[in-house]
Amino acid sequence: MKATKLLHNLGQSLWLDNITRDLFNTGTLQRYIEEFNEAGVNVEALAAQLQAEGAKAFVKSWNELLAVIASKSNALKKGELHANSAA
């Protein structure tokens, strides 16, 4: 009997508190679940981690957008771009 199955039979669960998007995207999490038979997932930790990753991605995208807007604005002020130019 696998050690993980024995732990489950004793009422214990394995917990993964370091779940990332990469674990989902690569199939590693699915492999863990299949390999370890009975595995618990700390949903609260997962939700917090995904929320933090989403917030970081949003802030990065927002800052990049603001930088492009500032650059285009400065170029327009200097007359380097025309107002209807897509460059």
Image (cartoon, rainbow, N blue to C red):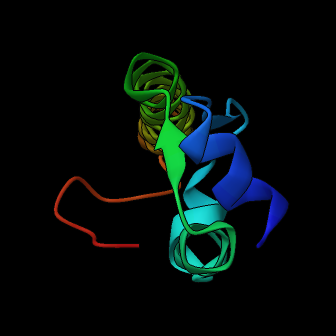
Residue located farthest toward the left when viewing the structure as drawn? 84
Task: State how many labels appear.
Answer: 0
In the rendered image of this protein, does residue 1 appear above or below residue 68?
A: below
Q: Residue at x 62, y 82 (%)?
A: 26
In the rendered image of this protein, does residue 82 appear above or below residue 24?
A: above
Can residue 79 be seen by looking at this rendering? yes
Residue 85 at x, y = what percent?
A: 27, 69
In this view of the protein, which residue sits in the foreground, 15 or 3?
3
Q: Residue at x 16, y 63 (%)?
A: 84
Q: Residue at x 49, y 27 (%)?
A: 42
Image quadrant holding the N terminus, namely: bottom right
Residue 13 at x, y = what percent?
A: 60, 35
Residue 82 at x, y = what percent?
A: 31, 59
In the rendered image of this protein, does residue 75 appear above or below residue 38?
A: above
In this view of the protein, which residue sits in the foreground, 45 or 75?
45
Q: Relative to residue 28, is residue 43 drawn left or right?
A: left
Residue 68 at x, y = what percent?
A: 50, 44
Q: Relative to residue 14, is residue 34 drawn left or right?
A: left
In this view of the protein, which residue sits in the foreground, 28 or 81?
28
Image quadrant holding the C terminus, namely: bottom left
Residue located farthest toward the right when viewing the structure as drawn? 3
Can residue 19 be seen by looking at this rendering? no
